[in-house]
Image: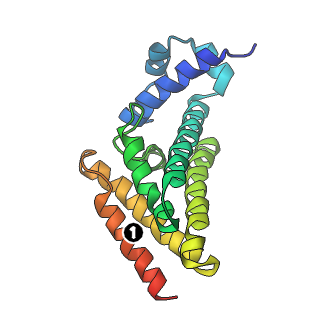
């Protein structure tokens, strides 16, 4: 029996809201099921386990995040602005109703000493997508040879910005991170 799309959406909405606000370990499956109005059989048929649901919620969040980021990239006036659009996208994404006080991927990764493969794959996909897209966006700014190195540096700035949101209780925006990223880009350009 196939799970209805509306039921899957309710399960993913409930998982997203509870897991990425209260934490994976502290959120019981029963709370997710109650919020979604679904049965245990439905959850296990659709996702196989709580870990499968966590991974599916992360994957959906990743697709949503990438669409937001891409919208900001498309609106940017030049190559450098496209590269730094990640910070505008982060601020926008965080302000949405489904935004979180910090990164759902970092939070999930931090909760597991040894994550189940399905969860590890979802977290790794986020990292890979960030790295790949930043590298693509860096190439027109600093050239193909240096794009990967700049992308790694910017990935560190982005991750640090996301982590600082947890330390500050979610207050603030990406202004400081963006200025650090600007300096990183300037340094990459001057060492070329």
Taking depth in this image into account, of 96 and 16 the one nearest to the observer is 96
Helix, strand or loop at label 1? It is helix
Taking depth in this image into account, of 79 and 137 the one nearest to the observer is 79
Residue marked by disc 1: 181
Residue 68 image position (x, y, % from top left): 50, 44
Residue 71 image position (x, y, % from top left): 52, 46
Query: Does the image show residue 12?
Result: yes
Taking depth in this image into account, of 130 and 23 the one nearest to the observer is 130
- Residue occupying the point 25% across, 50% down: 172
Up-down relation of residue 184 to residue 132 (above or below): below
**Outermost residue, bottom side:** 191
**In this picture, residue 3 sits left or right of residue 152:** right
- Residue occupying the point 60% across, 34% down: 56
Residue 40 image position (x, y, % from top left): 58, 15
- Residue occupying the point 56% across, 51% down: 126
- Residue occupying the point 64% across, 42% down: 118
Task: Find residue 130 and report its image quarter.
Answer: bottom right
């Amino acid at each position: 029996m196939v799970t209805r799309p509306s039921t899957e959406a309710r399960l993913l909405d409930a998982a997203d809201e509870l897991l990425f606000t209260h934490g994976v370990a502290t959120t019981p499956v029963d709370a997710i099921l109650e919020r979604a109005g679904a049965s245990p059989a439905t959850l296990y048929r659709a996702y196989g386990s709580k870990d499968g649901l966590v991974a599916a919620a992360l994957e959906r969040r990743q697709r949503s995040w990438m669409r937001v980021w891409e919208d900001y990239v498309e609106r940017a006036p030049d190559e450098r602005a496209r590269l730094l659009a990640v910070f505008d996208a982060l601020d926008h994404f965080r302000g949405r109703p489904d935004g979180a006080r910090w990164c759902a991927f970092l939070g999930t990764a931090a909760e597991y000493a040894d994550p189940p493969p399905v969860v590890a794959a979802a977290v790794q996909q986020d990292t890979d997508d960030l790295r790949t897209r930043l590298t693509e966006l860096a190439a027109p700014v600093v050239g193909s040879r240096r794009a990967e190195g700049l992308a790694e540096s910017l990935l560190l700035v982005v991750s640090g910005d996301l982590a600082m949101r947890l330390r500050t209780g979610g207050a603030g925006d990406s202004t400081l991170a963006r200025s650090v990223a600007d300096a990183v880009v300037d340094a990459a350009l001057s060492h070329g």
